[in-house]
Amino acid sequence: MLFKELVEVFERLKKTSSRLEKTAILADFIKDVPADDLPIIVNFCTGKIFPTWDERKIGIASQSMVKIISSVSYNSEPKVIESYKHTGHLGITAEEMFQKKAQQTFFAPEDITVRELYDTFVSLSEMSGTGSATKKQKTLMGILRRADPKEAHYIVSLTIEYVLSGAKEGVMEEAIAKAFNVDASLVRRASMLTSDLGESARIAKTEGKEGLESISIKPMRPVRPMLAQNVASIEEAMEAMGGIADFETKYDGARLQIHKQGDKVKLYSRRLEDLTEALPEIVTYVNRSVKADSAILDSECIAIDASSGRPIPFQNILTRLRRIYKVEETQKKYPLYLRPFDVLYVNGKSMIDEPFKKRRIALENIIEPLNSECSVALAMITSDPEKARILFNEAVQGGNEGLMAKDLEATYTPGMRGKKMVKIKSALDTLDLAIVSAEWGHGRKAGWLTSFEVAAFDEESEQYVVFGKVASGFSDEQLEDITERLKPLKIGEHERIIDVSPEIIVEVKFEEIQKSPVYSSGYALRFPRLVRIRDDLNPEEVNSFSRVMNIYNIQQRYERRDKGTP
Ligand code: ATP
């Protein structure tokens, strides 16, 4: 297939904001794509090169991209930078620069095929070590020399994995369902189980409904984690679970998905990054404590202060997860412990369709506790709200976030946020919002961005809506770090403010959510404050507008309760 055909699809997607139309365009496009090319095409359509589970990265920085565009389009680097400042997107800049090519080629270049572009990306991802930056530039320039302006736009966009008109995963799932006449929920299930939408599409095409149904999980292939909804009280949790539930300590750590096959162990973060090398002691605990030949476990990884016995704030664990190169040093400073809370697979058998109560027993059967280092999450099955309340108070006094409540009959639903598992927190709640703009500081902090506009994603309008500015709660180290990370994300600038692409998620604490005409959401957070930078979340995992409204409604219920109204 020619890349031109895909470019045409991107252009058509750009022209419509209707989800139905987008689905129709994509379904029509993919239905005749040969099965072998389908995974590549589906990933490209969603703006990705490799499936979610695949860790390969292209690794071309914005500065290098400016050089590449300049060299291939014969425009000076300052001219490319000028355009980039104006467009805020390197793909659009590439298109603009290719249109203004200072020199023309006199022969018609050979058309670029999708397969060839994919192979180029694969070879880029394999280049590492000294001289690899130059080698990467040359390789990408090779294919860009044959591109017309629109092709250049999308090749650059794919390279930086930021395709403006790329399809959202949900839209793509519906398009696959439509194209191959299967249920969208089956496609979604397959994609959540395999973390591979492209492969799910190939199976939908070649094996249909039966093929999708027979997809199962397997060790060493990460699965999207099941997520929880907020509830305002133990009673509300109890009601959602039908009068009886498993209540567990909600540990304040980082989620870890553990895969074991024989003596091989792999650890994956909530966003399915491979953390095995960063957490060697967890690998040791798993080998010593998990009594199964093969298993997939869901767990929380926590750090406990050896002297006080209390949990250390999550931010410190994140330091461990991010500073892979200082493993030994940080290992001593922040020793980590493991609290497995669910089992998805054991000894060759998937457990995800089993009810929670059975999974919990299976979990307890395979975990041999290692003192405080590894033990199953503290749990209690009860129908008595008072007993749950005592557990809640104990959890909070012990420095934990609150409780989780789990439906005893519920299956494990990867990637879904439902009422089969809910969380009850001590503080009302926090929000995970994306930074969409930032303002330069003054005085001592003049070189840093110090105030950040934060936004949720409104699924209806498909736009980010702002809820306020966060300027407190940041340490100097965090300000320096976030400034460096926001600079390359700049998409516009006005006075002291830069607009950035919404890639960085921050968890924000606040007093309450109020109606307000000041921000585009129509609401504002009162006294917003940073809790942590959520490097464990994907940019798409930003809270939705409806999730914020869910918290707003819970808050209203709290207020009514405090005023004595039921
Ligand atoms: P939050 O920001 O509130 O931690 P989240 O968006 O990361 O939420 P949720 O699914 O909403 O994820 O909340 C559940 C999280 O709580 C899990 O991701 C997990 O990391 C953590 N957790 C801690 N203890 C438990 C437990 N016993 N059972 C399930 N999850 C637990």
Image (cartoon, helix red, strand yellow):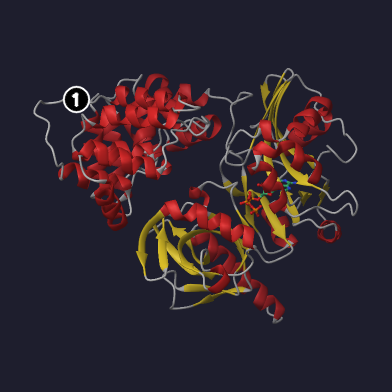
Q: Residue furthest left?
A: 106
Relative side of 186 to 235, left or right = left
**Residue type of the residue flagged with mark 1:** Asp
In terms of depth relative to the viewer, which is nearer, 344 or 449?
Answer: 449
Side (left or right) of 392 relative to 148:
right
Check mark 1 vs ligand 1: CB closer than 8 Å? yes or no: no
| Residue 24 placement (x, y as % from top left) | 28, 40
- Rendered image quadrant of residue 525: bottom right
- The answer to whether residue 261 is above or below residue 352 is above
Query: How many numbered circles are shown?
Result: 1
Residue appearing at x 53%, y 31% in the figure:
53
* Residue drawn 11% across the image and 26% down it: 108
The secondary structure type at the circle numbered 1 is loop
Query: Residue visible at 59% across and 65% down?
Result: 551
Q: Quadrant of residue 370?
A: top right
Place of residue 453 in the rendered image (x, y in percent of width and height, measured from the top left): 48, 66
The x, y position of residue 420, in whole percent, is 65, 47
Farthest residue, direction bottom: 563
371 relative to 229, above or below? above
x%, y% of residue 63?
Answer: 38, 44
Could you tell me if residue 566 is visible in this image? no
Whether residue 262 is visible here, answered yes or no, is: yes
10 Å crowding of disc 1: few (<14), some (14-19), many (20+): few
**Does residue 450 sit above or below 195 in this rendering?**
below
Q: Quadrant of the N terminus?
A: top left
Q: Which residue is mark 1?
A: 111
- Quarter of the picture containing the C terminus is bottom right
